[in-house]
Amino acid sequence: MAGEYFMTNLNKLRKKRKTDNAVEHKLRLFTSDKKIPAILVVEGEEDSNLYAYAFHKVVSDSSVRVIICNGKGGVLGLRDFSADNFPNDTKAIFFIDKDHDDLLGLENKDERTYVTDHYSIEWDICTKNVLFKLIEDHYALNLSDPIWGVVRRKFCELMTSWLDHSRPVMQAVVVARRNGENLDLKQIMLSDICRFHGESLEHTGISLEDLLIKAGIKNCPAKEELDQCSRELRDCDDRLYIRGKLVVQFFCEFFRRLNKICGYPTKIDDQSLTTGVQIGRNNYVRGVLNIWTIPETLRKFFNDWKERQAV
């Protein structure tokens, strides 16, 4: 039974490996151009900014080409196309989110493919240090200001609350995917699960079943399956199975509502805790490019690739 289960997931993943003529044409052009040192193949627009930045920091500031695919299946599809048509090429390197691969028994990593350490790359740019640096800079909050004590306490409190609300949802998603369901997680937003209310975070009241139906599920998991998954993931790092897009939304909302969350305090310079900067889901990546810490696994991936190019 276990073998059948893993083969079913593997076959479904292969079916999603579709690419279109436009990206195939780009790969042909870039591969044949000897002036291009590297081709970065990524899932989406935000990924292109992060991986290009990391490449320039770790490898060189040479001009590279980025091919943006339609999600993970597009990246893997183009990797297959590259292997079939350019078996000796080493310029093209591929970047994908891990998603729930480990929990589904799937393996997509190879020497030309970087797979994120956690569910997605968003978890590497959504850290406490990154958020606090954004607050320090854009709220002009002096590091000696007593307000920082409130900021840290409220962040810890609300992050804990958000994770408590999100775990059952994402555990149900794991079960559904193991059952062969194809869910559209773009349909589940932070505001569908919980909402900020003053200084706290409250559940919206929507049922787990309704959330899954919103994502396109056909057969909701049984309670026994959900309980079993909850026990299985009890000691699991939340970053390994909770969707990265949700943590970005949480960080953006915390940043935007900081003044209200902290109880409308006055800063040490007698100014209000306000900012004219708007950071949302669409510009969060650009806002943190210069302050996030490049993962060691990504540095190693680039350095290993660089060594192979020199051979």
Image (cartoon, helix red, strand yellow):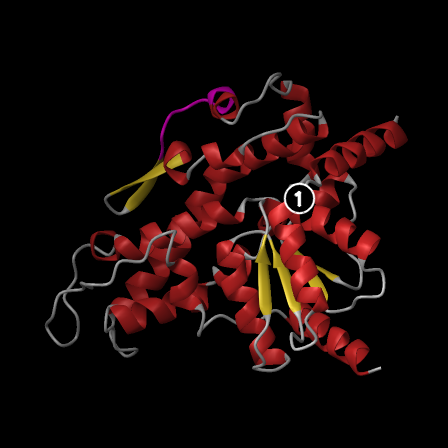
Which residue appears at 70% of the width and 75% of the height?
Answer: 34
Residue 39 seen by the camera: yes
Decide which of 254, 113 is in the foreground and name it.
113
Residue 257's x, y, as percent? 25, 52
Which residue is label 1 attached to?
Answer: 19
Residue 117 visible in the picture:
no
Q: Which amino acid does the dot numbered 1 rest on?
A: Thr
Between residue 115 and residue 16, name the one nearer to us. Answer: 16
Is residue 160 located in the magenta-colored stretch of the structure?
Answer: no
**Which range is magenta?**
203-210
In the rendered structure, the answer to whether residue 4 lies left or right of residue 236 reads right
The N terminus is located in which quarter? top right
Query: Where does residue 137 sit, x and y in percent of width and height?
Result: 29, 73
Residue drawn at x 54%, y 32% as measured from the top left: 184
Quadrant where the C terminus sits is: bottom right
Say if 301 sits above or below 166 in the image. below
From the viewer's perspective, is residue 137 above or below residue 97?
below
Q: Position of residue 65 (x, y in %)?
A: 59, 67
Residue at position x 79%, y 66% from top?
Answer: 89
Residue 272 lies, with reference to residue 263, above or below; the image says: below
